[in-house]
Image (cartoon, rainbow, N blue to C red):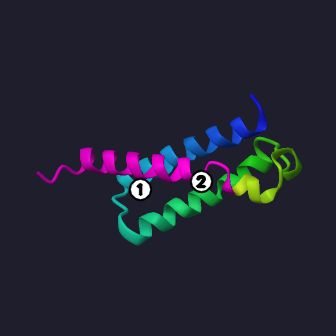
Amino acid sequence: MNTEDKIFWLKVLFALIAAVFCSAAAIIGKFGILVALLIYLATYPVEILVLKITPSQAGGTRRMILSGLITYLFIFTAIWGLVFTLTYNWG
């Protein structure tokens, strides 16, 4: 698995974790988006410290941070909405 794949799948995993956390804790609105953003930013130190990826391997710090952003947002939004709806059925 190459470096970009590792970064991509790490962000997919963190998006799932953020969505389930926000849904389970009933975090909605601006605070939910802030929590998701903080969890997204936590991927950078994980890439460096756990996966041992240097910015030069990934093509720079900017690329390490922005790689997988759209996927993260899509997965977070979809799973957050799904889990929140299934957990708190207001019907």
Crowd rating for badge 2 (residues with CA inside 10 Å; few <14, some 14–19, many 20+)? some
* 39 left or right of 58 in image: left
Farthest-out residue, top: 1
Residue name at image x 73 percent, y 40 percent: 4
Hey, what amino acid is under mark 1? Cys
Residue name at image x 50 percent, y 53 percent: 73
Farthest-out residue, bottom: 30
Residue name at image x 18 percent, y 49 percent: 89
| Stretch in magenta | 66-91
Please tell me which residue lies in front, 35 or 82: 82
Residue name at image x 85 percent, y 48 percent: 54
Residue 12, position as x, y percentages in the image: 56, 42
* 80 left or right of 74 in image: left
* 3 left or right of 78 in image: right
* 10 left or right of 86 in image: right
Residue 74, position as x, y percentages in the image: 47, 49
Please tell me which residue lies in front, 82 or 21: 82
Residue 89, magenta (yes or no): yes
Label 1 secondary element = helix
- Quarter where residue 2 is shown: top right
Prevalent SS, magenta region: helix
What is the number of callouts on the image?
A: 2
Residue 55, position as x, y percentages in the image: 84, 52
Residue 17, position as x, y percentages in the image: 50, 46
Compared to residue 37, the image places residue 44 above or below, namely: above
Label 2 secondary element = helix
Farthest-out residue, left: 91
Q: Which residue in the protein does label 2 denote?
A: 69
Q: Which residue in the protein does label 1 denote?
A: 22
